[in-house]
Structure formats: C-alpha cells, structure tokens
C-alpha cells in the first residue's frame, strides 16, 4: 500500500512519520519537488519526495495535507485523483481560528468530494494535532482516536486498516456528511488547546461503558 501526502507542512510530516514507521511507502508531493525531497530526507526511512502529479499518480492513497482553501489547486495538480482513496484531513477554519468558514449544511469533506468527484474521499485525522502526530501519534502512552467518515465502505475500511496498523484507534462514524460534526470537533480541540490552556498534547476520544 503506497501513500502520497500532498503538502510538506506540519500535518504532512507528522503523518508521513507515523505511516512510514508502520511500514508504508510514503511520498511527499509538493508544488516544489525540491521541498518534497528535503522533507523526505529529514524523515528518512521509506519516505520519498516528488512533484504532486507523480506522487499522487504512483500511490493508492492520497492525503490532502493542505489548507482547505488550497484543496482545489492540489486536486488539479494531482490530475483529479480519479479512482484514488483521498484522505481529507482539512478543517475549514477562519484565519484567527475563532470559527469555521463553512458548516451546518456542508463540510470541507463534502466540498472536496465535489472537487474530486471520481475520488473516494474519506475524512480522517482532522481532530489530531500535528504535534501529537510528530510525537508518534500518542498522547502520553495512550493511542489517539481517528474518526473516519466516508461514502465508500471499501475506502473507509482501507483507511481504518492504515490507521490501526499505524497505532491509532479508528472509529467509523458514518457517511462523509458526518464531516459536518467532525470539523467542529477539531475546532473544539483548538479552543481547548490554544485558548483554554490545555496545550497541544491532547486529542478527542469517545468514552463507552464497555
Ligand atoms: N496543524 C494541525 O495541528 C492540524 C490538525 C488537524 C488538521 N489540520 C489540517 O491539516 C491541513 C494542513 O495543515 P498544516 O498545519 O500541516 O499546514 P501547513 O504546515 O501550513 O502546511 C500546508 C501545506 O500545504 C501545501 N499547500 C499550500 N497551498 C497549496 C496549494 N495552493 N496547492 C498545493 N499545496 C499547497 C504546502 O506545501 P508545499 O509548499 O510543499 O506545496 C504546505 O506545506 C489543514 O487543512 C489543517 O486545517 C491541521
């Protein structure tokens, strides 16, 4: 299973680290291939770098680790992502993180599916801070929860298997439209982490009695 990560920022590096440690072949795709090579060199292991078109074209799964507003550009650079499993990690936040720019009747997940209609878009990892991923994906010694939403069950199961093998606790939450709930959860995580003093070594999970 090969994974392309579009972007070379904080989330891209965090996810590349946990996926490569789990044994996946990971390629950064950047607008500047030299930047992708440099990010790959920093991480070492099975990580490589390329331009966006070839990174996406040569991978089974493509992670969009770009700002929500840049998703259209990234999808265009990746030649539309036809048939690919696309993991959308974005949160459509205002510049000051005080709210979401879209919601209630749509979500970043659904808008990205519209931008890449032939891809199988799965929402995941949007509620985990990059710093938690860069520290290995755990909060303290506890594995973090990955909430997974999508409309294609095979794609959901594939992302669940990747998350599980990478040391996370996956929770399937339903259709891609459930991103309307997942994106505000990320907003609450930011509110607690940055505005309420919890810091960024936190992650939302769901408790059950059993
Ligand atoms: N940071 C977090 O803790 C966190 C947590 C959960 C979810 N998220 C979400 O994850 C996404 C990435 O966040 P981040 O913190 O990693 O951001 P970041 O550090 O700013 O990195 C974003 C990356 O997006 C790429 N990019 C920007 N504009 C682009 C364009 N027009 N076309 C193609 N690529 C473009 C850039 O890569 P190149 O310059 O190499 O092309 C850049 O490195 C965001 O949607 C954010 O909401 C972030």
Image (cartoon, rainbow, N blue to C red):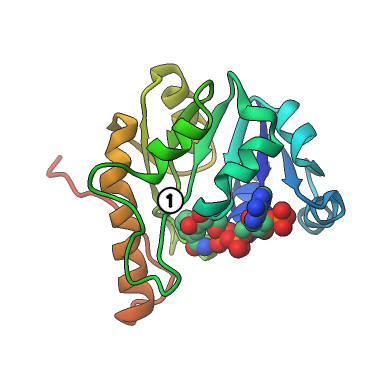
Report the front residue among 121 and 157: 121
Percent position (x, y) of residue 205?
29, 52
Name above or below for residue 98 compared with residue 145: below
Name above or below for residue 138 compared with residue 209: below
- Which structural element holds mark 1? loop
Q: Is residue 17 left or right of residue 89?
A: right
- Quarter of the view holding residue 174: top left
Ligand 1 within 8 A of label 1's CB? yes
Name the image quarter holding the N terminus: top right
Q: Residues within 10 Å of mark 1 (few under 14, many from 20)?
A: many
Give the residue pinned by disc 1: 126
Q: Is residue 161 left or right of residue 172?
A: right
Q: Can the viewer see residue 173 in this picture? A: yes
Name the image quarter holding the C terminus: top left
Residue at image location 36% in from the left, 24% down from the top: 151
Q: Is residue 33 left or right of residue 207?
A: right
Name above or below for residue 89 compared with residue 115: below
Residue at image location 29% in from the left, 56% down from the top: 184
Residue at image location 60% in from the left, 21% down from the top: 82
Percent position (x, y) of residue 79?
69, 29
Name above or below for residue 63 compared with residue 9: above
């Amino acid at each position: 299973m090969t994974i392309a990560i579009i972007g070379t920022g904080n989330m891209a590096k965090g996810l590349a680290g946990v996926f490569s440690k789990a044994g996946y072949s990971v390629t950064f795709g950047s607008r500047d291939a030299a930047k992708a090579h440099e990010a790959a060199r920093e991480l070492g292991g099975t990580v490589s770098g390329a331009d966006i078109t070839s990174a996406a074209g040569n991978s089974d799964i493509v992670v969009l680790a770009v700002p929500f507003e840049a998703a259209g550009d990234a999808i265009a650079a990746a030649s539309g992502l036809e048939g690919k499993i696309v993991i959308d990690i974005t949160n459509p936040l205002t510049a000051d993180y005080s709210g979401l720019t879209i919601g209630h009747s749509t979500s970043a997940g659904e808008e990205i599916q519209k931008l890449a209609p032939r891809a199988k878009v799965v929402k995941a990892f949007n509620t985990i801070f990059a710093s938690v991923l860069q520290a290995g994906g755990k909060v303290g010694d506890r594995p973090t929860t990955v909430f997974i939403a999508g409309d294609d069950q095979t794609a959901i199961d594939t992302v669940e298997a990747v998350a599980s093998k990478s040391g996370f606790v996956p929770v399937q939450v339903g259709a891609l439209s459930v991103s309307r709930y997942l994106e505000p959860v990320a907003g609450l995580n930011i509110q607690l982490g940055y505005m309420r003093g919890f810091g960024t070594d936190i992650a939302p999970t769901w408790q059950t009695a059993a």
